[in-house]
Image (cartoon, rainbow, N blue to C red):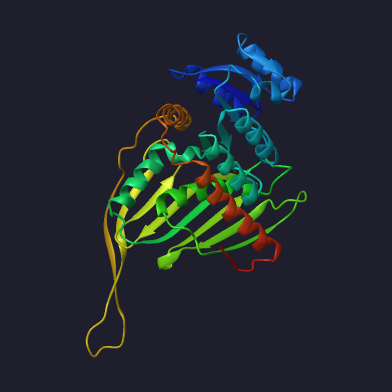
Amino acid sequence: MNFGVIGYGYWGPNVVRNLTTLEGSQVLMIADLSAAARQRAQRAYPSIHVTADPQDVVKSTKIDAVAVISPVWTHYELTKAALLNGKHVFVEKPFTSSAAQGEELIQLAESRNLKIMVDHTFLFTGAVKKISQLVDEGALGKLYYYDSTRVNLGLLQHDVNVLWDLAPHDLSIMDYIIKEDPEAVVATGEKHLNDFEDVAYMTLYFPGKTIAHINVNWLSPVKVRMTLIGGEKRMVVWNDLVADEKVRVYDRGVETTTQEGVYNLLVNYRSGDMYAPRLEQVEALQQELKYFNHCITTGQDPINDGRAGLRVVRMLEAASESLSKRGALVRL
């Protein structure tokens, strides 16, 4: 599979590195508007053609698939151009700047029998694979909540707010694990350094009383990547920054009973064992790109296809509407 990569900034070098080492794929062209980025790419990969014009990539007859690793406001135009030129597309999250753009791209890809994969990298980590397995097996029981803190100092964006930058990670994970569409969204936040919110909180209400909360922040003095998932039977703690035991499963919970003729609710707190399941040790991006190759070759629809990306964008749009209304409930 011959790839062209558009964007060689923060994430682009990782995509190029994995594609060049992946069996069955090669990178023929890299495009970036920045002269400094082009120089870095050329030094690292002397045999790959480097250009300043993304159109050189999308129009090349030698390229089968294009990786769009550029700011979100460029995703729609670049992905559309690639699809119109018969290329499969791997596009960085979030998929598009609006749901309308995403819907158009999905229809275009389907009409031309082309694949879109949105870079929801965390779906391919050992941690998320294990958590998804536990949920599917019913080990956690009915899901009560998903609570995530994703904060750090730095990487301030100048084209999107912190929700559009960091929340897609958790929204894609929730979409994959919970497997139900949220019914409503509430979001609050504040702007401190520019015209975009740099601190934000997002709450999602799912059918069956499952609730999710996301705390994202560019102004935290420490980096935290912590997720709590509570179920009727068991609870999970996922700390992505520790080397060992990233995922811990706790056999803890609350059980309520009532007795005939007794109006007081009887509450029992269950505290059982904790264990850390063995996780698959893989580089998620490498697994994701390998899977993209497989989907193109076999015609299989990716789990993180355009429709999955669109669901995340719809949640982000609802959150933006709620932000603009100072935390008003927005139904999906």
State the residue lying farthest toward the bottom.
Answer: 261
Name the quarter where the C terminus is drawn.
bottom right
Q: Is residue 165 above or below residue 262?
A: above
x, y percentage for residue 15? 55, 26
Q: Is residue 42 left or right of residue 144?
A: right
x, y percentage for residue 318? 61, 59
Tally of numbered tags: 0
Judging depth in this view, the residue of 39 and 307 nearest the camera is 307
Q: Is residue 144 above or below residue 237?
A: below
x, y percentage for residue 302? 44, 38
Q: Is residue 151 visible?
A: no
State the residue lying farthest toward the left.
Answer: 260
Res 112 quadrant in image: top right
State the residue lying farthest toward the front.
Answer: 111
Q: Is residue 159 visible?
A: yes
Q: Is residue 204 above or below residue 72?
A: below
Q: Is residue 62 above or below residue 227?
A: above
Give me the residue at 54% from left, 45% from top: 309
Give me the residue at 44% from left, 18% from top: 24
State the residue lying farthest toward the right.
Answer: 194
Judging depth in this view, the residue of 320 and 146 nearest the camera is 320
x, y percentage for residue 176? 43, 48
Q: Is residue 238 left or right of residue 327?
A: left
